[in-house]
Image (cartoon, rainbow, N blue to C red):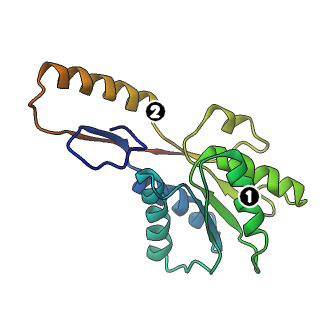
Amino acid sequence: MMDWAPFEGRGDIIQDNALLGGELATRHLIERGYTRIACIAGPLDKTPARLRLDGFHKAMAESGLTVPAGYIVDGDFEFQGGFNAMNQLLTCDPLPQAVFTSNDAMAVGVYHALFQAGLRVPDDIAVMGYDNIELARYLTPPLSTVHQPKDELGELAIDTLIHRMSDPDASQQTLVLTPELVERGSV
């Protein structure tokens, strides 16, 4: 199982530490002085999406910050999902000061919704993504995000599969890689 799997069963598991990643992203926003922080969660049937949301809640709670009603919106890890979710957040009163999106694709949709609403990133609302996709650095302003080590995840998956083929009865392995904060201009 790798990354998006529900992580149930007897197979080997290779994943990034999505709980820590959600905490890193949210703590970064808090450290920058934001207190009204919303979260656009990924599909909660995916373990990484649930863990990123858990990390968001953990960082908010540890900082003594509450999450106002309506500040958590379900997304789908797609551009349109981020656009729709941000439009939903734009109906909140007061508006969030910052938004943590559970992946960069949804952050792109957030940028578009904010642009259409006449709002500017980060002047009006800061945006924090997750994944560090190639497009993130080319947005205006470039997207702050959490780097998920996808190349390393892929390499570990292949190495683990080769090991499993040579020793099918070896004990189950769980390999977890550490995500890293990438600071850019959107926060």
Kindly identify the residue that appears in the image at 23 percent across and 47 percent down.
9
Out of 112 and 79, give the one closest to the viewer.
79
* Residue 186 seen in this snapshot: no
Residue with the most extreme left position: 169
- Indicate which disc, 2 or 1, sits on the residue closer to the N terminus: 1
Q: Quadrant of residue 127?
A: bottom right
Judged by depth in the image, the label closer to the viewer, 2 or 1, is 1
On residue 137, which mark appears? none
> Against 61, is 145 above or below?
above
Residue type at numbered disc 2 = Lys
Q: Is residue 71 left or right of residue 2?
A: right
Residue type at numbered disc 1 = Asn
Kindly identify the residue that appears in the image at 77 percent across and 80 percent down.
93
Q: Quadrant of residue 4?
A: top left
Q: In the rendered structure, are the residues bearing label 2 and label 1 in contact, judged by CB atoms less than 8 Å apart?
A: no
Residue at mark 2: 150
Residue at mark 1: 84
How dense is the environment of label 2, judged by Cα within 10 Å: few (below 14), some, or many (20 and up)?
some
How dense is the environment of label 1, judged by Cα within 10 Å: few (below 14), some, or many (20 and up)?
some
As helix, strand or loop, the secondary structure at mark 1 comes to helix
Query: Which quadrant, please, contains the N terminus?
Result: top left
Out of 144 and 69, give the one closest to the viewer.
69
Q: Quadrant of residue 69?
A: bottom right
Kindly identify the residue that appears in the image at 41 percent across and 55 percent down.
20
Q: Is residue 75 left or right of residue 80?
A: left
> Against 87, is 181 above or below?
above
Kindly identify the residue that appears in the image at 63 percent across and 47 percent down.
144
Residue 63 on image: x %, y %: 49, 75
* Residue 35 seen in this snapshot: yes
Out of 150 and 168, give the one closest to the viewer.
168
